[in-house]
Image (cartoon, rainbow, N blue to C red):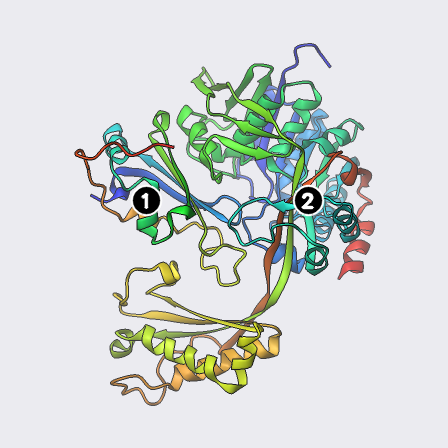
Amino acid sequence: MQLHEYASIIRSKNAGPFCLTIDIFFADAGGYALARRSDLLTVPGVARAYGVAESDVKGVWWDERVLGAKVSLLRWSSSSDPFCPDLFGAHLHTPLAGRELTDPRQQPEAAVT
Amino acid sequence: MTNSPTVRMLGFVNHIPPAPDIEESIARALDWGVDVIVAQGTGSDWGPYWLGSGGQVQANVAQNVRPYVQAAIRHQIPFVFSFGIAGADVHLDRCLADFDRLCAAEGWDLDVAVIRSELSKDYLRERIAGGAAVRPATADAGLVPELTRRDVDEAERIVALIGPEPVMAALGRGAAGVITGRALDIGLFMAYPMLRGLPTAVAAHAGKLLECGGLALEPGDSGQCIWAQLDSGGLEVRSPHPGYRASVRSLVSHTFYERSHPSLEENPGGCLDVTDATYTETELGVRCTGARWIERPYTVLLEGARREGFRAISMLAVREPALLRQVRGWSDAAEQALRSSPRFAEHIARGRLRVATRIFGLDGVLGPLEPNTEVTGHEACVVLDVVAHDRVLAEEAAYFGFIRLFIGPYPGRKTTAGNAAAPYMPVVIPVSDVYTFSIYHLLPLADPVQPFAAILQRFPGARLEAESRINATA
């Protein structure tokens, strides 16, 4: 299943003009646990999903209280760029949301920052 | 001032129209008690256009604040508002003129402390000449590593996101309220509780939770207001509207909102750290404790916009299946014809002309990051986007590109009377001047108040001055 199928909310927004932040809130603890095990919501996984350098991914954070994850990236085209396609950064979650969430149980748990 | 102060705050967003039943929510908050009413009305989400152009987002702030100011006057509660989206003087003055008309129409008579946060270029040139190191607020964004006099000269306008201190100074002067230009949202909320002696960490935590009004409630709605009671140990947040509620989930998830980091937030003079904050449901809301404030050298964020040129676009809609299958190749060929034309090549080489093509139905949102290479729907829209040094060049290049798209050949072409549908007249649409955030830098300040002195103004009556300032800059 894809990431968005496990989430009740996936919201994408600017955090200042130059940073994009994506908040994901999972529908249940099972989805949250799976996402935390998977390699999608890691710095390399996010970089792969968007096709950007790992250094452009500022971090991935988790909050069990709200079954939430947060991903922040440097914007590849910000509102400061004359050709920015998404002023508010509201629709840039889709490359991540459409990725398969797989369970790499054989791999060590992804590093948490 | 008391020894163990509590402060009750009502928060909302003044650039969003209030819910139709907002007066009932305000009445409920007043039953709980309200010591200050606070609302943000500035931001950079709208991009650099408004700051650069001096134009106004027509957000109707005077009407939006009317029910809140009415409550403030009736109950002698001070209010703190930032006005004008981009929040430079020209934006603030238009909002003040509208607010003045509102006061006249309602029969209000108010002394308001007005704080301007646009910085004069002379002030910044002097600071730079005096050795102030003005560095980017964010790394890797392509900003100049240290602000120079030239950057100041080239910017159309420069504003500072003022912290709580200028608002505290203004509140201390006994005005009915304070209205600022561009300001740090949470600083507006921090000012009154800090003035009453509450810890900065609690004031900042309240600001973080209340700055977007009812968006931090469940369900989130910025047209609703939000209430909190602060004391030296923390705060309790409640929803004045019974159809909404503050929950642990709504508040914790709101701390994520529009911040790059979930628990650390850099602010003037310090970092708000909510890593160890706890949230506990109460009978009517949520008790929030445990935020920390880590002192830092005092800086304010500057935003400055520089003109990049003038934009003209041309739009063509494609429904012909033979063309849809190769729409990117066809539009790339048209763009390439434009780029290599003797009329335009020199301008492009000198950076006076830039061209991009967006294809809605293929790569309109993600652009070069879009992994799909084919249109999968039955139609698409091609937008040729030109930004040039001046309007004439932009329109000329866009028309050249339009013609190439309209009549340019493609393999298997049968549509020899025209390749696509032109939905708009004129076929070249002049859009506007285009701006960039050339300044997004931190200015060190020894005195957080000094450049942002409040001026007491009487409403109604301040409109003539506001309008003369607008006319002088027009």
Q: Nearer the viewer, residue B453 or B34?
A: B453
Q: Quadrant of residue B470?
A: bottom right
Q: Secondary structure at mark 1?
A: helix
Q: Chain of mark 2?
A: B
Q: Which residue is mark 1?
A: A44
Q: Quadrant of the C terminus of chain A?
A: top left
Horizontal placement of B40 versus B1: left or right? left
Within 10 angstroms of label 2, few (less than 14), some, or many (20 or more) residues?
some
Q: Is residue B44 above or below residue B298?
A: below
What residue occupies the far bottom of the structure in this picture?
B416
Q: Total of numbered circles in the picture?
A: 2
Q: Nearer the viewer, residue B10 or A102?
A: A102
Residue B353, x across and y down, in percent: 55, 74
What residue occupies the far front of the structure in this picture?
B131
Tell me if I can see residue B107 in this picture.
no
Are both tags, 1 and 2, on one chain?
no
The type of residue carrying mark 2 is Ala
Q: Secondary structure at mark 2?
A: loop
Q: Nearer the viewer, residue B6 or A13?
A: A13
Residue B420, x across and y down, in percent: 36, 79
Q: Which residue is mark 2?
A: B133
Residue B2, x across and y down, in percent: 71, 11
Residue B25 image label: none
Q: Is residue B328 above or below residue B34?
A: below
Q: Nearer the viewer, residue B162 or B380?
A: B162
Query: Residue sitting at 37 percent across and 62 percent down?
Result: B368
Q: CA distance from mark 1 to mark 2?
A: 35 Å
Within 10 angstroms of label 1, few (less than 14), some, or many (20 or more) residues?
some
Are circles 1 and 2 on residues that touch, CB within 8 Å? Answer: no
The type of residue carrying mark 1 is Pro
Residue B370, x across and y down, in percent: 33, 60
